[in-house]
């Protein structure tokens, strides 16, 4: 029996209600349904990047764990000055591996085959198949793609995202046609505190400054995106559920 848990796209639907509906789908094939269907989806990152490449260089700034709800509530002056982000739905389950695969291939999990944190080899060509494309990662890449990423390790007194930024800035100033920069630190912190802007203030400030620096160093088209959001759970946070905090992310573009 298929159990469909309708998720109504209304501003006053509480997350507790959404989570109760999500619990109804255990063992069923369908986790939920959007109504109405969102106009924007993270699979569009792939096509937006390829279209912009016809005009010049492209950079994709990928902030792991930045849900649309958090984006709206957070103080992000550099990001919000440059980008008018749209609300986009992400893939289900809203975990890094399936969602990253959907952004980079333009396919949904049923097509690329990535459903969990244990899956690493997506079907279909990703943006890393573009000649000269470079992905800057932290020390552990979530997916195995056409090219090995640039891996980074933080030095003494340096954050994970600080190391990623340091590796990406010289590439911004070079001739890399397609640069993808993946920041992990926000997602790591959200597992401790959930999506609370006050408790995430230092990390959000660091990321906002990093995005400003990347845009200042780059000349071309920039896509800002995220894979999933997060919600509070107990004393910390988690993601992977069919809730609006997990399933909606920002998607923006700017020429710099």
Image (cartoon, helix red, strand yellow):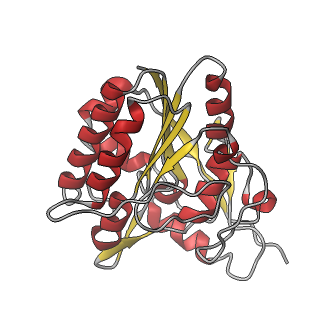
The x and y percentages for residue 111 are: 81, 57
Q: Quadrant of residue 152?
A: bottom left
Eyeballing the image, is 170 above or below 10? above
Q: Is residue 159 left or right of residue 31?
A: left
The x and y percentages for residue 95 are: 55, 65
Q: Quadrant of residue 231?
A: bottom left
| Residue drawn at point x = 46 percent, y = 62 percent | 15
Q: Quadrant of residue 109?
A: bottom right
Q: Pick whichever, 172 or 223, lies toward us.
A: 172
Eyeballing the image, is 146 above or below 190? above
| Residue drawn at point x = 35 percent, y = 48 percent | 167
> Taking the image as drawn, is residue 94 in sight?
no
| Residue drawn at point x = 61 percent, y = 44 percent | 42
> How many numbered marks are there?
0
Q: Pick whichever, 186 or 52, lies toward us.
A: 52
The quadrant of the image that shows the C terminus is top left
Q: Is residue 101 left or right of residue 154?
A: right
**Which residue reaches farthest right?**
1
Eyeballing the image, is 99 above or below 142? above
Q: Is residue 158 left or right of residue 121?
A: left
**Which residue reaches farthest bottom?**
27
Q: Pick whichever, 85 or 151, lies toward us.
A: 151
> Taking the image as drawn, is residue 177 in sight?
yes
**Which residue reaches farthest left?**
157
The x and y percentages for residue 12 are: 45, 49
The quadrant of the image that shows the N terminus is bottom right
The x and y percentages for residue 247 are: 55, 55
Q: Pick whichever, 243 or 220, lies toward us.
A: 220
């Amino acid at each position: 029996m298929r159990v469909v848990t309708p998720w109504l796209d209304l501003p006053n639907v509480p997350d507790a209600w959404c989570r109760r509906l999500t619990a109804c789908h255990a063992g069923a094939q369908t986790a939920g349904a959007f109504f109405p269907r969102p106009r924007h989806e993270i699979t569009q990152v792939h096509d937006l990047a390829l279209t912009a490449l016809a005009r010049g260089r492209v950079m994709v700034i990928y902030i792991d764990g930045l849900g649309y709800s958090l984006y709206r509530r957070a103080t992000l002056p550099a990001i919000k000055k440059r980008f008018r982000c749209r609300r986009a739905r992400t893939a289900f389950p809203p975990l890094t591996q399936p969602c990253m695969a959907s952004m980079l291939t333009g396919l949904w999990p049923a097509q690329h085959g990535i459903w969990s944190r244990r899956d690493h080899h997506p079907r279909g060509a990703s943006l890393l198949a573009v000649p000269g494309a470079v992905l800057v990662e932290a020390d552990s890449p979530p997916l195995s793609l056409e090219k090995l990423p640039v891996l980074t390790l933080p030095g003494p007194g340096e954050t994970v995202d600080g190391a990623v930024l340091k590796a990406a800035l010289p590439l911004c100033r070079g001739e890399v046609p397609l640069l993808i920069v993946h920041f992990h630190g926000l997602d790591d912190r959200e597992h401790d505190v959930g999506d609370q802007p006050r408790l995430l203030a230092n990390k959000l400030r660091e990321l906002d400054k990093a995005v400003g620096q990347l845009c200042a160093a780059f000349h071309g088209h920039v896509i800002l995106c995220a894979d999933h959001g997060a919600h509070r759970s107990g004393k910390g946070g988690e993601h992977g559920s069919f809730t609006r905090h997990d399933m909606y992310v920002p998607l923006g573009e700017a020429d710099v």
